Amino acid sequence: MMECGVGGISDSCILHTCKKRRVCKGCIPPTNEIMAEIEASLPVLHLPDYYTKPSLEELVAQELLDPGYCSRVPDFTVGRYGYGYVRYLNETDVRGICIDEIVKFHKHEIVVYSDENDKPAVGEGLNKEAEVVLVLDSGILKSKDAQQDILVKKLKRIAERQGAQFVSFDLVTGEWKFLVQHFSRFGFGDDDEEDVVMDDAEIYDKEKESPSNSNEMELSHSLPSHLRLDPVKMREMRLLMFPDEEEVEDLRHKSSSGKEYVRPLQTSAQAIIPRSNPPVARKTPFPLLEYNKHWNFDSNSPGGILMVQQQKGMPLRTIKSQGFQLDLTHETPVSGNYARNIVDAGLFMGKSFRVGWGPNGILVHSGAPVVSSGNHKLLSSVVYLEKVAFDKLVRDENNKVNEELVDYALVSPLNFHKGINHVMKKVEIGPCKLTLQKLEANRTTLSEITHQYCDLIERQLSVPGLSSSTRLGLTHQVMTWELIRVLFSEREQKGLVESLGADNEEDMMQDEKEICQDVDQEALPLMRRAEFSYWLRESVSYHVQNQISSLNDSHYLQHIFVLLTGRQLDEAVQLAVSKGDVRLACLLSQAGGSTVNRSDIARQLDIWRNKGLDFNFIEKDRLRLYDLLAGSIHDALHDVKIDWRRFLGLLMWYKLPPDTSLPIAFRTYKHFLDKGTAPCPVPLFIDEGTPDEAISWDMDKHFDISFYLMLLHASEETEFRFLKAMFSAFSSTPDPLDYHMIWHQRAVLEAVGVISSNDLHILDMAFVSQLLCLGKCHWAIYVVLHLPLHEDYPYLHVNLIREILFQYCETWSSDESQQQFIEDLGVPTDWMHEALAIYYDYNGDHSKALEQFLQCANWRKAHTIFITSVAYRLFLQAKHTEIWRIATSMEDHKSEIENWELGAGIYISFYLMRNSLQGDTNTMTELDSLQSKNAACQDFVSQLNESLAVWGSRLPVDARVAYSRMAREVCDLLLSAVGEGATRDEQFSCFDTAFSAPIPEDRRSAHLQDAVYLFTSFLSEIAT
């Protein structure tokens, strides 16, 4: 009896396989080619307690009536008697599927594709949407918890935690039905079963239980089940790796009162693994029970990590694991909260897992170490996923992403940035070519640029539904852009200057006064000071109005003092006049003017003090005003707290001479700050935010960006440490992950030559993360191209752009405008095609993946996909023209492709061989004699066999079928040419070639019969 060859089956093989697949012999007619294809289409099922719907017999019948039925079986069902079943929705391809190895039913559990390495993509094979029914045993249905609503609630919780959708539960039949989108493991874990069966059961006799400390508790040991791991496999792996440390797991524990503690469920590992030797005792590890974030290494410190050994005489009580919940009372910059809750010590302290990052800001972590918070304790051995709020910037007061905010906050500023002049620099980074960009501007155009950014922010402020903190942050951004204009812009040599207010020192600039062609350079610092004074007055007006609204109208002197802190001299003078205090009004009208007036007021106060004047007859608030007008701002601010901007204003307006330049004023404030006699320059959102934010703010590390800009103007300091602090998110926004406007500010300051730094990559990357989180991949690449070229990291741009293209391929590939934008940026199209190829290959669309690999000239990968996934499908569909097009497109690069002759070269050789054997005159090779044809066919058959050996398991069954059909067709053409003109040796040699080819067994048998007939005829001729 011949052995079964590739691509075909013999009679005995059919009978054997029919028995193997539980199909009766009578179901299949006598052997032929159709029966061979039907046999290859049937799924494999060995286990007697499993069944399918339709049954295997019904599948055979349907395949006979409707060829290809097994590739589109509707509502295919696999079940196990007494355990449940799974019904696949829509149509399912069951050809050649080994159900025994794929679908496994256990008690209250279904596992499909237990080996993750063999699992196909979602939607392929049996890893697709299905309806699952699991039958619960009678023990659960008879428990005291077996009430319809209670069980339904618990089953819903289990299904939702595993990503399934609960459908129904029948208390009579015990059938639990739910829907899944794809498969791994669904059903009960160890703790789930204990939860359903023993949730309210008494584990031990509470009346005779010895008193114990309620603060002591045992950590849950359900880590494998919580991580959806098979406890049996986990135990087997542990015993294989650590045979000397077999775990002591007693099923019965006795308390000091004699009561027995019984574990509700016995693990399957205990039932399977026999114990030939007594268990090896080992010390129980100390459980981690309490953690304090302020712990130190002092072993006697009560705030350290406490390691408490188990009490040997007390029974263990099982506590249901619930998972920790985040404590929202403490906020952190990353996730917005602290997790001071109990977690599984083995999970948290283990070396195998700590924390990880996923796409779009997904943070995977195991929570915090074990802690105690009062009497409320929770257990957890669950890994948590949190989304980092990169997109908080564009969320409204309802925490919903507002597309209008996305446009105003991100897209519009970037479009404006793109419209400014840029310097393009083409660089070659290894074999790659990129066009890096850098903003180009000067200080004369800085004023126009800042006005445009302010207009964009004001549009954002007009969007309804903004939270108060968002509005505060936007106001701060407007003030920052205005300060940049004031401090660093330069004027044209002629033009008009607008009046900046009613400040005395600003009166030097008359309304709409035309500046001469050549401005006196000595006047420029005073003009800049006047503009800064106006900016400072506007920035503190909010504080002034709020404080005035909280004062009593009868205390007009306090009103006047508050008005002076905001440089509102007109209002202060009018208020004094309205109260009849004309002398004070006269003094106020000269406030901040000549230093002679200040000296006179200070001398008068000294005379009063030297003469022993009783100041109790003068209002305290009036003396405060006199001290302020005399330039003694610290005496005036005694027991009064004001913000740092108003303090700077008082210093510049009333203490320093009116012609003091801004750098000297800023350095003077810095001097008082270092001495601790000036308020800290905290950002606006702290000054005007909630008291809780002010308490949690670190005064020593983070200052307002306005303060840094002032220091930059005063000293032009551009050290990296200074710039890093200046462009920190905390310097301008309460959102620590928001760098969108800081990036623009840095770019503009660099363009006008104020700063220069190549080390602020954290700023660029933070902005890139924000853009990627919102799906703006093209703008993220635009930002990357503005990164300065660093000698230490020459491939930074290449790696970042490729990573964006590959990780976010689904996002940018679905938007044609993004694709075109990326191409216009000069990003190599080969990178885009390669990213698309890998994306399509990952999702199982091999035809599109092949085309993309060809586009990016990745010939090796294209060749592999062509052979293992595409070519055989096209061949079986008789799309020979498409095969020829693809194969010949790679032929010019065959020197770069490994095993070309045993891959795509097979198909090219086949078509050339077939045309030659058919006598096509257009072929390049002409095979005249039978010997030359046989030699060519022998080479092709040898090529086929070698290809099968080289590619091996990488070739699916259908690919081998395609090889078999090519071999059969070539052999049929060769044997059809065997005629009277050939010698017997040549004829027998042709049959030898056919026998060595990977053709179906039925065809080989037919050729054998022809060879026998030829041999018989040869013997007859010899006999005669």
Image (cartoon, rainbow, N blue to C red):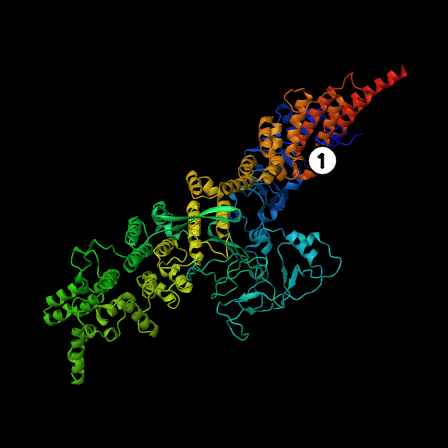
Query: Tag 1, which secondary structure?
Result: helix
- Rendered-image quadrant of the C terminus: top right
Residue 341 placed where, x, y %? Answer: 49, 61
- Rendered-image quadrant of the N terminus: top right
Nearest the eye: 751 or 187:
751
Q: Is residue 981 above or below residue 954?
A: above
**In-image side of 601 versus 767 (left or right):** left
Q: Residues within 10 Å of mark 1 (few under 14, many from 20)?
A: some
Q: Is residue 48 visible?
A: no
**In-image side of 80 versus 637 (left or right):** right
Q: In terms of image quadrants, where is residue 319?
A: bottom right
Residue, far right: 1023
Q: Is residue 776 above or below residue 717?
A: above
**In-image side of 372 versus 616 (left or right):** right
Residue, far front: 518
Q: Is residue 14 above or below residue 264?
A: above
Residue 647 placed where, x, y %? Answer: 27, 68
Residue 422 placed where, x, y %? Answer: 37, 48
Q: Is residue 873 above or below residue 142?
A: above
Q: Is residue 474 visible?
A: yes
Q: Which residue is mark 1?
A: 946
Nearest the eye: 466 or 1022:
1022
Residue 693 placed where, x, y %? Answer: 36, 63
Q: In terms of image quadrants, where is residue 90?
A: top right
Residue type at the position of mark 1: Glu
